């Protein structure tokens, strides 16, 4: 069996592809041939090389919801990507395609439609993005993570799966995290996450609150590669050195480090991307979610609302992210043991351990039709 995986741009699009690839390899052993077709980013290359998945590069044009000259450049990327995808698929001719959605999937899904190769797309958010609503017309099945997304697609195509996340993301080693990130003592650990690329807004809020916040918690802070040096500089201005006094900043957390940190964390401050939520939920971590205000269709805010509705998390808007409100929310969660326990239990309902398996079953059903 040959399956093409497509998507990319962020960890939220890459890691679900890996989760499904792991399930396919587990089920079919040596009888599966996996190929990733997508953008040539550093994250994509590193992850696919580590997973032993072949990779072919195809460009896709990103549509930004604000004025940028890059919109004019990217307008031409999708047609070029489409013709290159046509050529690649002609030679590869896979049995099916699993598309994570987003702009990076568009050229490959359109090319697959030309050859009548069955496509299953996955929508991870409560409100689908424009790309997936468009790509549904060229796909046989649509897997969704939130029931609220079903109304945007043809019901006959929809498969409710949850968000697939990597195997053993909830099987981390607390002691390994303590040792590597210099965590000492009994104060709870706050894990600050801004997505695979980091978040300048979350970074700024954490740094401004550092002197006071470290009285309550220890912090492991994933800053993003491009923000790391700036964060260290700003922390030093507050009198805080990295890996000292209960504060450790890192540019990026690889899979082992991420699951180890998740196992140790008593609280998370995070963006509200579907993948981040799923990994936090798998570990039952009470969370403060800060939706990305510029996210397409406001999908991160909608994701966060779903958790807030069942008391699984607290949401703070970017515009309301002052140091005092952040400290107050952190302290209130940790001080109220009953609320803390309730949040931990409720957020686990957003973890679907069989999501990747259901998607594999959906792919198989398409092939066997």
Image (cartoon, helix red, strand yellow):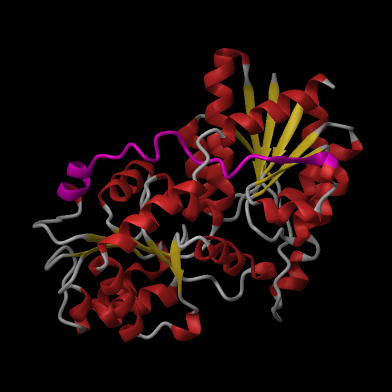
Residue 369 can be seen in this image: yes
Does 121 appear in magenta?
no
Does 164 appear in magenta?
yes
- Left or right of 25, for residue 287: left
Residue at 49% x, 41% y: name it: 47
Image quadrant holding the N terminus, namely top right
Span colored in magenta: 156-179
- The extreme front residue here reads 338
- The extreme left residue here reads 185
Residue 212 place in picture, x, y as percent: 19, 80
Residue 86 place in picture, x, y as percent: 83, 39
Residue at 29% x, 44% y: name it: 260
Residue 61 place in picture, x, y as percent: 74, 60
Identify which residue, 247 or 325, lies in the foreground. 325
Quadrant of the rendered image containing residue 185 = bottom left
How many numbered discs? 0
Residue 228 place in picture, x, y as percent: 34, 67
Residue 172 vertical position relative to residue 26 in the rendered view, above or below: below
Image quadrant holding the C terminus, namely top right
Residue 250 can be seen in this image: no
Identify which residue, 56 or 64, lies in the foreground. 64
């Amino acid at each position: 069996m040959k399956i093409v995986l497509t998507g990319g741009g962020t960890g939220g699009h890459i890691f679900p592809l890996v989760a499904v690839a792991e399930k396919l390899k587990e089920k079919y052993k040596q009888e599966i041939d996996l190929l990733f077709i997508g953008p040539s980013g550093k994250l994509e290359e590193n992850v696919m090389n580590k997973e032993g998945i072949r990779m072919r590069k195809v460009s896709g044009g990103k549509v930004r919801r604000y004025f940028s000259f890059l919109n004019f450049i990217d307008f031409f990327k999708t047609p070029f990507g489409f013709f290159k995808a046509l050529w690649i698929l002609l030679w590869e001719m896979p049995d099916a395609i699993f598309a994570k959605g987003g702009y990076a999937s568009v050229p490959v899904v359109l090319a697959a439609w030309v050859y009548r190769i069955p496509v299953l797309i996955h929508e991870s958010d409560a409100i689908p993005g424009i790309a997936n609503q468009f790509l549904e017309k060229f796909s046989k099945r649509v897997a969704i993570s939130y029931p609220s997304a079903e109304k945007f697609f043809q019901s006959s195509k929809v498969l409710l799966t949850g968000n697939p996340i990597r195997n053993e993301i909830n099987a981390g080693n607390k002691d390994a995290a303590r040792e590597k990130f210099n965590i000492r003592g009994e104060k709870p650990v706050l894990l600050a996450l801004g997505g695979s690329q980091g978040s300048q807004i979350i970074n700024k809020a954490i740094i401004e609150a550092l002197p006071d916040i470290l009285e309550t918690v220890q912090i492991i802070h994933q800053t993003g590669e491009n923000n790391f040096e700036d964060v260290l500089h700003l922390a030093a201005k507050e009198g805080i050195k990295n890996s000292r006094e209960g504060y450790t900043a890192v540019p990026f957390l690889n899979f082992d480090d991420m699951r180890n940190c998740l196992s140790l964390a008593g609280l998370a401050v995070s963006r509200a991307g579907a993948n981040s939520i799923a990994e936090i939920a798998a570990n039952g971590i009470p969370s403060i979610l800060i939706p990305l205000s510029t996210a397409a269709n406001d999908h991160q805010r909608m994701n966060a609302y779903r958790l807030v509705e069942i008391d699984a998390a607290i949401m703070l808007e970017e515009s309301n992210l002052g140091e005092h409100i952040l400290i107050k929310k952190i302290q209130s969660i940790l001080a109220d043991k009953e609320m803390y326990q309730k949040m931990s239990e409720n957020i686990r309902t957003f973890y679907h351990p069989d999501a990747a398996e259901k998607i594999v079953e959906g792919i198989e059903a398409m092939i066997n039709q």
